[in-house]
Amino acid sequence: MRVLWSEAALQHLAAIYQYIAQTSPVYAEGVVDRIWHRSGQLGEFPDSGREVPEYKRPDIREIIQGSYRVIYRRGSDAIQVLAVIHGARRLPPLR
């Protein structure tokens, strides 16, 4: 199954890098790299994440990578990564 990233999720990933890189570009690259590679598992194991408690929808799931929640929608032929949110932040309303 293909894993597609939404524009919003890519912007989140860039913002995470920029924030962490202020103090350590090497660490920032590692964090973003781990998030990116972890999302790759979804192509083989699309149900490996749990249902997002705040949304209560079976097609909206998440995997945890470090301090970050990788929110995704499971479709019939593709996974779409919707957002990458720090675990301490509140999730935005689902559109």
Image (cartoon, grey):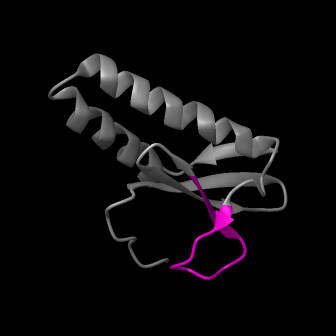
Relative image position of residue 20 (x, y in whole percent): 24, 33
Exactly how many numbered labels are in the figure?
A: 0
Specify whether residue 53 is painted magenta: yes
User: In the rendered image, which quarter is residue 51 located in?
Assistant: bottom right
Q: Quadrant of the N terminus?
A: top right
Which is more toward the observer, 26 or 60? Answer: 26
Which residues lie in the magenta part? 50-63
User: In the rendered image, which quarter is residue 52 located in?
Assistant: bottom right
Specify whether residue 54 is painted magenta: yes
Which residue occupies 43% across, 50% down? 68
Relative image position of residue 67 (x, y in whole percent): 41, 48
User: In the rendered image, which quarter is residue 36 located in?
Assistant: top right
Relative image position of residue 11 (x, y in whole percent): 37, 46
Which residue occupies 69% across, 44% down? 3
Which residue occupies 68% across, 57% down? 49
Q: In this view, does 42 lie to the left or right of 61?
A: right
Which residue occupies 32% across, 27% down? 28
